[in-house]
Amino acid sequence: MFGIIIVTAVAMISTVTKVYAQTTATASEYDVFAKTLEFTDSQNALYKYLSSEACELLSKRESSIASIQTLEGWQARQKLIAEVLNRDLGPFPPKTPLNAKVVRTIKKEGFRIEHVIYESMPNYYVTASLFVPTNLKKKSKLPAILYCSGHAAEGYRSETYQEEILNLVHKGFVVFAFDPIGQGERIQYLDKDGKPFIGGPTREHAYPGSQMFISGNSLAKYMVWDGIRAVDYLLSRKEVDASRIGITGRSGGGTQTAFIAASDERIYAAAPECYLTNFTRLLQTLGPQDAEQNIRRFIADGLDHPDFLIVRAPKPALMITTTNDIFNIQGAKDTEKEVAKVYQAYGKPEAFGRVEDYGAHEVTKKNREAKYAFFQKVLRNPGDSAFVNYPLLTADEMRVTETGQVYTSVGGETLFSLNNKEVEGKLKRLEEARHDLQGFIPKAVAAAKELSGYREPTFSEPVYMGKILKNGYTVEKYFINGEGCVFPYLLYRPQAATNKYMIYLNAAGKSDSAAIRDEIEPFMEKGFVVIAPDFPGYGEMGPGTLKGDSYMKGASHNLWYSTVLIGRSLVAVRAADVVLLTKAVLSMNRQAQITGFAKGEMAPILLHAAAFSKDFGRVILSEPCTSYSAIVQNRLYVSRLVMNAVSGALDGYDLPDLAASLAPCELWIAGATDGAGTTKDGQQIAKDLDIVRAGYGFSKASEKLHFVPDNDSF
């Protein structure tokens, strides 16, 4: 019975008799690309493929921009940018009362600091500080600067940012500095002792940000919204001139500056520092950055860094750059050239410029003074632009909340809790749609194809690279042209082979390690020919040199973000390669009966492939996470599960819907897990499996569905 096979494969029961010798092989013996020159950099093939796709899209945008010759053309472009940003960033929530409170006031020579807590959304607290000049003779309203912090754990309290703020306030500007979520006094992941545990600011952004992408949301939306509400607070102050609002920040603060200024027309002048380049150069050098800096489908929908400034023209803007910044200087120069054209079309070329100084990803004296001079001119606040070393404020003077953290002082919503409120609505809509399974299941499969960016693969003959003789079986080595990358696979052929074939997916790769042999050999004992590939990102095809600032527990979320930008997914690329392997099997044996086996994080790959192809007669999922919603709704999820998730999936489907669509294909699900990689959330697991059960029941194929709860069941 096949039940014995699934028990053997999943539980790896030690009592199964092995008829094959436990041969220990060297890694090179099973490497397909070891004797090739062309594929020596195969570990980076996936990122190169994704970045080349992005660059093709960017090239189309560049051609479109080059065709604009009139002011009317640029105004049409500005309208398009605004529409796309509103759609891809938003929708923004409705404005609710800020309930702003000044919790402390610190008086210093020449200025005072009012420490403020406001609610950008109900019960979602933002810690901030308002710096107000007090030694000015004039009583008229003052220009104001919204200050955005880069990726410093302490937020705007860092030495570099304090120096900026103090110079601006001493030069007669009201300065409002606020903590980005995950920084300063808004750390989200605190242990029982109130200490951060998830990592630095980029991980504080990436970890919940990836959940947001899966649910069709974005971290950037919330960060921009905090800034928009900060402008609301500034305009509520009697000291501030509403017509003279500026914004600036460096690094991650430069990102926020660019995003917020592009989204809020009330900001008159913008000076993003050490951020703006263009995506072509960013992808060639640094790669995508943390979740804060990525907007879903941004490149797919025809936008690039210059558009953040183009949409604002002809309002004053200054790009502040350094020659050796991590954000490529050539990209900054290319952006400057492009943005200058729209200002020229408006007849205001003097309103835009770029300053450059020697330096790395840092603040320089020249750039600081250029920034001060820029704001003094365009916000009509003349004075000395020289940088001055003012005494820094103490940690206590800069503290806003009682404990130094908003979540231990006043509590409130986190990104995780806010996103889950939106997710609940989406899951409810999916649940309602499932009431009509006949209509919904085809729609769910179609949504999976569209949202994942799936492309039907074109079959080409595999390239045979040799054979290894083992005791009782042979191992044939091949590579084949995949959806975007050439990938290798091994074909394990037992002496007593039948028409039964298995496509075997394991994140450990195709190698002949003891652990993999323990799973593959029992299938060969039953006459299966087993095909074990290394898909892009795994085995010989990975993991690649890109780790990035959002690398967590073996998973480069930065790599995944490259798919978010272009409307694709890693799972779609890999699912296409699975479908390709089914075509390879059928080209060898038209009578082949194909089984798919996937372990752990590989399960979504097989589910997508099997839903898109009808060539599988049987699918086995070993220790799969039951759904994307299980990842999104688990505060401490397994980081690697993101890599085979689909951005925006919950707008149209979830993994149980794909599993339900497989009926009447025989489906085994063994050792199902929650988003934390455990069986603790039994309610979530049961709910997801019930969706699959309902689909098989509707198709009158319940006898083809098998759930194996855990290894102790055998």
Image (cartoon, rainbow, N blue to C red):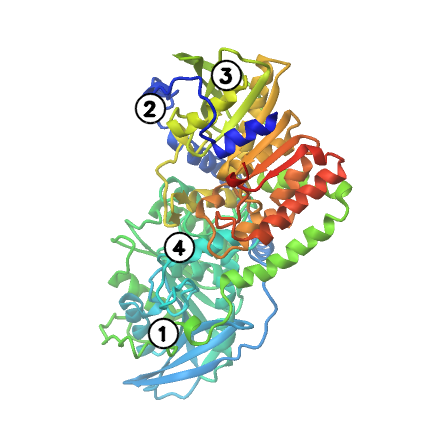
Q: Amino acid at mark 2?
A: Ala
Judge the density around disc 1: few (<14), some (14-19), many (≥20) Cα neighbours within 10 Å: some
Where disc 2 sits, the SS reads helix
Is 670 rendered above or below residue 320?
Answer: above
From the top left corner, tell me how far across and down residue 58 is, in percent. Answer: 49, 41
Q: How many marks?
A: 4
Disc 2 designates what residue? 27
Name the kind of residue labelled 3 in the image.
Answer: Pro
Query: What residue did someone put label 1 on?
Result: 404
Which residue type carries mark 1?
Gly
Quadrant position of the N terminus in the picture: top right
If you read the primary sequence from the N terminus, does the residue marked by circle 1 or circle 4 appear first? 4
Asked if the residues shown at circle 1 and circle 3 are in contact, with their CB atoms under 8 angstroms apart, the answer is: no
Q: What is the C-alpha distance between the residues marked 1 and 4?
A: 20 Å
Badge nearest the viewer, 2 or 3: 2
Q: Which residue: 40% across, 30% down? A: 515
Classify 10 Å Cα crowding around label 2: few (below 14), some (14-19), many (20 and above). few
Q: Nearer the viewer, mark 2 or mark 4?
A: 2
State the CA–CA distance, disc 4 to disc 3: 41 Å
- Looking at the image, residue 598 sits to the left or right of residue 470; the answer is right
Specify which label sits upstream in the sequence, 4 or 3. Answer: 4
Q: Which residue is mark 3?
A: 462
Q: What is the x, y in percent for residue 12? A: 47, 31
Image quarter where the C terminus lies is top right
- State the SS at label 1: loop
* Circle nearer the N terminus (2, 3): 2
Image position of 630 with respect to 585: above or below: below
